[in-house]
Amino acid sequence: MAMNYPAASHGVWTRGAIKVIGGGLAGVEAAYQIARRGQRVILFEMRPEVYTPAHQTPYLSELVCSNSFKSKELTNAHGLLKEELRRLDSIVLRTADETSIPGGKALVVDRERFSKIITEGIEAHPFIEVVRGEIKDIPSGIVIIATGPLTSDGLAEKIREVTGVENLFFFDAISPIVDGNTIDMEKAFFGSRYMEETDDYLNCPLTKEEYDRFYEELIHGERVYFREFEEVPYFEGCLPIEVMATRGRQTLLYGPMKPVGLIDKSTDKEPYAVIQLRRENEAGSMYNIVGFQTKLTYSEQDRIFRLIPALKNGVFLRYGSVHRNTYINSPSVLNNNLQLIDNSRIFFAGQITGVEGYMESTAMGLVAGISVYTSLTGKTFLPPPEDTCIGALLHYITTKKKDFQPMNINFGLLKEYRKKDKAKIVANALESISIWKERIENNAGL
Ligand SMILES: Cc1cc2nc3c(=O)[nH]c(=O)nc-3n(C[C@H](O)[C@H](O)[C@H](O)COP(=O)(O)OP(=O)(O)OC[C@H]3O[C@@H](n4cnc5c(N)ncnc54)[C@H](O)[C@@H]3O)c2cc1C
């Protein structure tokens, strides 16, 4: 049954309830965070009536691919993010812990038990009503949209109406991000084309021999192939670098590896080829390789991109990719409480906000749930501090930037990463999350 509006007859108590669309990781977390604070929620999930091309079960919080939530170790940003969620009483994290199976340093779950236990818990919650059916229009009242990377077409159209055509994307074209601490600065130089004095770009030069070797490895590198539903209509502006390279040995030299106007002071010449890195944050802890969106496998990205001399020891905080992915231009359309700037009754949560990954989406579900609850109490939402993983992700997706691309959690996002060691960053994050928790539990906002 497709619904333009949610049915009004799901029980008297549902009147005035918060509506959450999408029973994935983010929608479930948002619904739970609101309900555990005593407010009523209707959670709409289109499965089993309508399936996305990747989901296969009727369960809430289905994991569409891997059953791993990545590292458990606190010295890894994925591990730290999970610990923060654990401390904030995340239902997704708690259930992941309950259903974990051996997986070495990673938190790996029994896929079916995980989703089943969440479904049972949510369906039995006295303050949550689960309604099955595709939502095709944005319902009245306060709504959280958490329909994920495979949001159904009808609803996507409505989201486009409220965000603006230019602010909804159906595919991502992601360039890798390098940890600023791991770039060999002796082999790179700052400067924009014809403007040596600026430090907007960090240029990584290659000689002809280095370029030829890089080129050969690039065109033969192993790629991730698309599943049928993921087939991406490539646009000229966002061709994967290896696809562009197959057009000819010189093509990259006129595109993303163009050296024109860039003088390397150590030789006083234009290099044969240049790869340009652009800061992702003010601190310079993360550098984006400009124009290097790619379908190479992660291990091939490590191997091939490290042939660039300045990146020989580079550590990638985010790998490049090209995906089917519905997401909004959050920095332009959302406040830092995940609420639409132009329509205060609509909130977004999960991957559709421009985070990438299971736990990152859960985190943005948790924030949206707490944010909505706070707004109901008439208070102003207090965002999680930027020295926590959750706060850093929220800050990233809601801060204006040129060329917004989805982001996974990594230490480069955290404030002060360049200045502090990991142990200190972890200690700060955990202390900050405890203080934030106390504040939101006690007074629900500012
Ligand atoms: C093919 C694929 C593979 C992936 N592999 C991984 C991986 O290995 N590891 C990883 O960390 N991340 C992976 N991701 C990303 C991961 O799926 C997301 O980060 C995460 O599931 C997002 O959570 P979410 O709650 O935002 O969206 P989802 O988990 O997708 O939940 C959205 C829910 O909304 C429902 N829905 C959609 N439209 C409507 C509508 N109109 N009405 C009602 N309900 C609707 C959907 O049925 C779904 O249940 C993958 C994504 C895809 C597409």
Image (cartoon, rainbow, N blue to C red):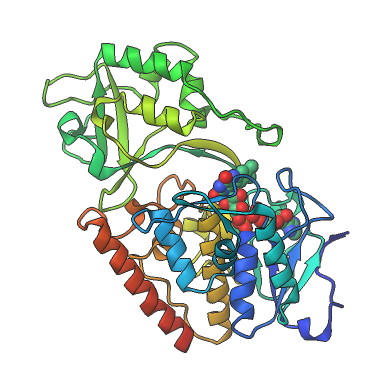
When the figure is inspected, residue 380 is found, relative to residue 239, above or below; the finding is below
Residue 136 point in image, percent of width and height: 78, 58
Instruction: Please report the residue visible at 82 percent of the width from the left and 86 percent of the height from the top.
Output: 12
Where is 165 relative to 339, above or below?
above
Q: Nearer the viewer, residue 317 or 148?
A: 317
Is 402 left or right of 11, judged from the image as shown?
left
In percent of the image, x 24 and y 24: which residue is there? 205
Q: Residue drawn 40% across and 13% down?
A: 216
Residue 19 in percent (x, y) is at 70, 72
The N terminus, quarter of image: bottom right
Observer able to see residue 400 = no
Tally of marks = 0
Judged left or right of residue 323, residue 82 is left
x and y percentages locating residue 375 in the rendered image: 55, 81
The answer to whether residue 413 is seen in the rendering is: yes
Quadrant housing the C terminus: bottom left
Q: Position of residue 139 (x, y in %)?
A: 74, 69
Pick the residue in front: 404 or 188.
188
Q: Residue furthest front?
A: 102
In this rendering, would 412 be left or right of 104? Answer: left
